[in-house]
Amino acid sequence: MKLLFLHQNFPGQYLHILRRHIREGVHDLLFLSQPNTNSLAGVRKMEYPLVRAPLKQADPLLHDFDLAMLRAQSVAARARELVKLGYEPDVILGHNGWGELLHLREVWPRVPIIPYFEFYYHTSGLDVDFDPEFPMDADKRSQVRIRNATNLLGLELATLGQVPTRFQGSTYPDWAQPKLRHVPEGVDLDLCKPDPGAEFAIGERRWRKGSGRRLVTYVSRNLEPYRGTHIVIRALPKLLAACPDVDVVLVGGDSVSYGAAPAGGGSWKDRFLAELDAPLDPERVFFPGKIPYDSFRAMLQASSLHLYLTYPFVASWSLREALASGCTILGSDVGPVQEFVTHGETGMLFPFLRHDLLAEAAIDLLADPAQAARLGARARAWAEAHLTLDETHRTMHAVMEEAIALEGSARQGFPAPRRSAKKRAGTRSSAG
């Protein structure tokens, strides 16, 4: 079968699916992406040039939609070149949010299209207004609602849609639910696993679980309110005072992935640090920025307590990897986290807005190593039961078969997926 994947930043959410197809060696894999340096042996990567420049000084309500249409036009131009070469895929998969899929129905009318749907935006009730410290004005609410334009076009276009978690699928309207299929995103459990001998280092400082100073960890692609950076930073003075043998590492960049940038410029991290009554001890609190994936894995393995916070929004890959690594997890008590962490069983939860309760819960867990160890072991067991790449591949296979049947295609069905062999190690940048 010919499988066509699309994501402006290859390989996007398709890394594990592609690796499995490469190992099985059954399907022809073609990936359309904007230029980047990433590659996978066994996948033909074709870059698409932009057919025009983005609109200058576009109305803010049009900015994201213009970029989506620009990508759609550019991908369609490349797709028509493929048609001239005799190429027609059997299934098309791509992240809907970037707009790349939106003109492909006209290029290949009978080919099943399975967009990856990440989140349907709401002007209230989910991420917007969740944190009263950062209210949203009416103009911004309109912009949030308009962001669903690409979502809505993708839902009309899709044969079926893929959602990574049940919570994220639930954000879509009731009328869209019949098209959506939950494809759980698994973790390489042989790569992300407990390792009592793992050592994490920042410069000359080194930590190993069960030896020397203890390590509290926090990860976000960028340090910002959507992932609770302000809550964590405000909890640190109390935590550090109560636990003198504890150090803290906060991994993430100083840009903005989600939500607004701070008024007046600068980074959210610097703004929140400036609010504290006294500076944090640089010999105990570390901000290494973004770190290589192998260091990220070692950090999770060396962690005595891992903090994971998010608004009611998209769940991070790092949460799955922390579970697989057997971390003791203290997370925010919101829908996307509750899907992965059960309070008192696979971790502990606290009310997101209460930095005082975060500090108290962290202190209690650090004071009870036996309970922390039980929670970490149960987190790993849960990952082994629910986050296998076999399950991801099996479910994705079933969705593709269903999409082919829905399009009424006479194409030959997929061969049954094989159980995975020993996983290969890989690299990925840490992301929250």
Image (spheres, grey):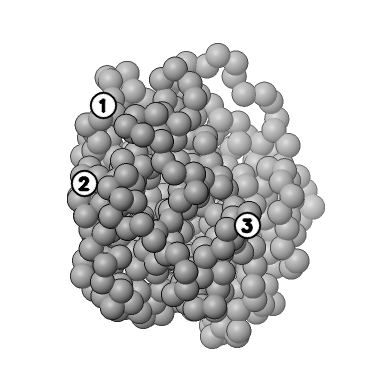
Dot 2 amino acid type: Asp
- Give residue 158's position: percent from left, percent from top: 45, 51
Q: CA distance from mark 3 to mark 1?
A: 42 Å
- CB contact under 8 Å: marks 3 and 1: no
Dot 1 amino acid type: Pro
Q: Which mark is residue 135?
A: 1
Q: Is residue 277 above or below residue 84?
A: above
What's the residue at 47%, 38% (across, down)? 257
Q: Secondary structure at mark 3?
A: loop
Q: Earlier in the sequence, mark 3 or mark 2?
A: 3
- Give residue 412's position: percent from left, percent from top: 59, 75
Looking at this view, is 328 or 2 the one in front? 328
Q: Marks 1 and 2: which is nearer the front?
A: 2
Q: CA distance from mark 3 to mark 2?
A: 32 Å
How packed is label 2: few (under 14 Cα within 10 Å), some, or many (20 or more)? some
- Give residue 210's position: percent from left, percent from top: 44, 75
Q: Is residue 215 left or right of residue 166?
A: right
Q: Secondary structure at mark 2?
A: helix
* Residue annotated with mark 2: 356
How packed is label 1: few (under 14 Cα within 10 Å), some, or many (20 or more)? few
Q: Which mark is residue 204?
A: 3
Looking at this view, is 286 or 336 the one in front? 286
